[in-house]
Image: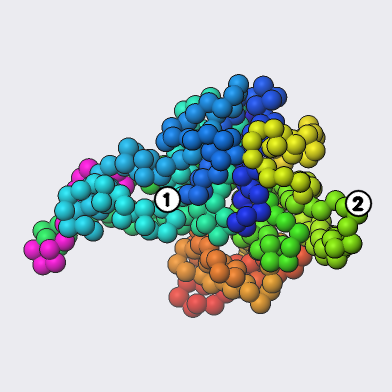
Amino acid sequence: MKRIYIFTGKGGVGKSSIATAHAIKSAGEGVRTLLVSTDMAHNLGDIFGRKLGADIETISRNLDVYEIAPEYVMEHEFPEIGNYLGYLLSEEIDGSNGLQELCMIPGMEELFSLLRIAEIYDKEDYERIIVDCAPTGETLSLLKFPELLSWYMEKLFPIGKVGVRILEPISKAAFKVEMPNKAAMNDIEKLYVKLAGLQELLKNRDVTSIRIVTTPEKMVVEETKRNYMYMNLYDFNVDGLYINRILPKDIGNPFFEQWLDIQQGYISLLKDTFAALPIYEVPWYDEELKGRENIERIVADVLADDEVFAARVIAERECFRQVGDGYQLEVFLPGAKKEEIDLYQAATDVVIKAGNFKRNIPLPNILRSYEVAGAKFEEGKLRIRFEKVWEGSGEHA
């Protein structure tokens, strides 16, 4: 079965090197592999010592590399949206200007990169797609964006075409604003369908794995813990942790003794926090990891395990369960703090806020007459209780 592996982590922790090592190992096993970069500061060309273009390029037998240009994807997949935005935002019909404006919206560049990956997964015969993602904050925005945008489009799109038809003469006369034409609306509808498919693909635990790269440093470790919690909030399957740049214990230099103690403390903390995950320790090498020969050192030293590419499901998915006369929703939030969690019910959704991130979880139809009656956070799980409301009384059954 075809698989997607997404590598994320704080900027500068070595994601590109770790992702590239996996791609080289995969190709060496005789598996047709594509290594993709969605980071706007592409590093793959530097690693392989060659200039990469806007298309997929073959590096060696079974290994292709692709540095995605989201503007190119937007221009060729959704041209009418670009044309409309060019008119609306630049006050002239110029699709390239509209494209530039659209790509300035936070998360849009990464979103179109993911759409391109999903298209490659569906149409090409790569057995493994390995993704070198942007730093943590951008990756979190990237992965939650399809669900968030799909949610808004699902709420608004059913009335979209009708609304455009009714408002078009009013908006043009009163506000001098051009509504999207039929072609643009068709592109928006196509985008919505693709987003739904993308969301399903990213959350399919038999297909997509998220793997976190970190280093044994205080700020990086804290961000890694938050990253893991947020990934679980959005129900992604994190199935691997890579601790990079570990100093050798026999370094034989008194200057590094304190650093060794500090690193070992954070390594122990990471192992305790991520005990459920496979953990890979990557040594600090004595030279920059550029060029295939140097990256292959990681393959030999760290990725010799035959289970590196195994599909693992580490935590349960969020789930609704019937409990007595009511229902319970369980959401796994490892590492979260009780005081940072908030939730409320908004129409047909339950909204969970954890730290700086918020997620809308649609309620199944059977719970449309139920309300949140309480919640508990224990052992890394948020358990939300729903009880039926008597019609007209506003009281729980």
Residue occupying the point 10% across, 67% down: 174
Crowd around label 1: few <14 · some 14–19 · many ≥20 (10 Å)? many
Inspect this view and state whether residue 221 appears. Answer: yes
For the C terminus, which image quadrant? bottom right
Inspect this view and state whether residue 383 appears. Answer: no
What residue sits right under mark 1 in the picture? 109
In the depicted structure, whether residue 300 falls above or below residue 112:
above
Q: Which stretch appears magenta?
A: 173-188
Q: Is label 2 in a helix, a strand or a loop?
A: loop
Residue occupying the point 81% across, 53% down: 247
User: Mark 1: which amino acid?
Assistant: Glu
Q: Residue 143 at what x, y percent from top left?
A: 53, 52
Q: Residue 299 at what x, y percent from top left?
A: 74, 35
What residue sits right under mark 2 in the picture? 250
Crowd around label 2: few <14 · some 14–19 · many ≥20 (10 Å)? few
Picture mark count: 2
